Amino acid sequence: MIQAALIFAAGCYAIALLLNLWRIAVGPDAADRILALDTMVINVIALLVLYGVWRGTAMYFEAAMLIAMVGFVSTVAYCRFLLRGDIIE
Amino acid sequence: MFVFIAEFLIAIALVVSGVFGFVGAYGLIKLQDTVQRLHAPTKATTLGVGGVLIASIIFFYLDKGYVSVHELLISLFLFLTAPITANFIAKTYMARNLQPRELPDCAGDYGWSIYDDPPSSRPDN
C-alpha cells in the first residue's frame, strides 16, 4: 500500500516538475520564471523526502534541508537583483 | 492493527500531497495572469510538501521507533519562507510591470517602498 502511494506521489511530483519547466520556458515575465524555479525547488524537496521513505533511510533529510535553504536564498537573490539592480547594497 | 492504521495514514497523506503538488503546478500553467499564478504554487505546493513530511514522520516512527525532528525542521522552514518568497515575487512583478499611478494610494507617509527610497536614506533627514 505504501509502495503504490509512493509511486503515485512521485509520479505527481514528476509531472509537476515538467509543468514547472514548461512555465520557465514560456515565461512571459521574469517574475513567472522566478516563481517556477521556486516551485521546482519545493517539488525537488518533496521528491527527495519521498526517495528517503522509499529507501527507508533518514540520510536524505539533510540534503532536503540544504536544498530548502539554498532555494530560498537564491529566490530572494533573484528578486533583489531585479528589484534593486544589486543583491547586497 | 496499529501497523495497518499507520500504513493507511501514510498512504492517505502521500496521495493527498501528490494531488496538492500536481494542483499547484497545474495552476501555474492554467491561470491567466502572473499575480494570479502566484497563488497556486505558494499555497498548494507548500501544503503538498507538508503532506509528504507528515507521511515521512509517521513512516520513520513506525520503522525506527522514534519521532524524527528533521521533517519538522524542513516543514517549519518551508512554511516560514513561502510567504516571504511570494511577497518578493509580487514586489518584483510590481516594480517591472506596474506604474505608481495605477496603484491605489497607500495610507502611510512615504509612498510605496518599491518605487520610493526608504525615508532614512533621503538627504533631508
Image (spheres, coloured by chain):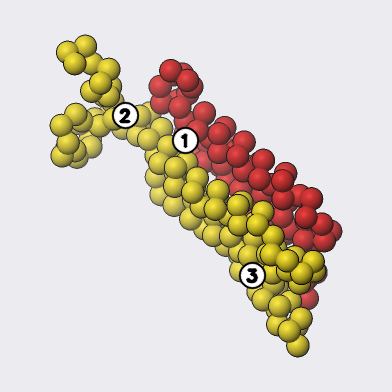
Chain colours: A red, B yellow
Residue B85 % position (x, y) = 47, 41
Please give the residue where the numbered disc 3 appears in the rendered image.
B13
Chain ID, mark 1: A
| Residue at horizontal 44 percent and vertical 42 percent from the top | B84
Q: How far apart are marks 2 and 1 (CA)?
A: 15 Å
Secondary structure under the numbered disc 2 in the rendered image? loop
Q: Mark 3 lies on which chain?
A: B
Label drawn at residue B114 = 2
Disc 1 to disc 3: CB gap under 8 Å: no
Question: Which residue lies at the image location 40% right of the left edge and 41% below the top edge?
Answer: B87
**Neighbour class for label 3 at 10 Å: few (<14), some, many (≥20)?**
many
Quadrant location of residue B60? bottom right
Which of the two discs, 1 and 3, sits closer to the camera? 3
Q: Can residue B14 be seen in this view?
A: no
- The C terminus of chain B - image quarter: top left
Name, please, the residue furthest toward the bottom.
Answer: B1
Which residue is at 78% across, 55% downward? Answer: A58
For mark 3, give the secondary structure: helix
Residue A9 image point, x, y percent: 70, 63
Observer-side mark, 2 or 1, equals: 2
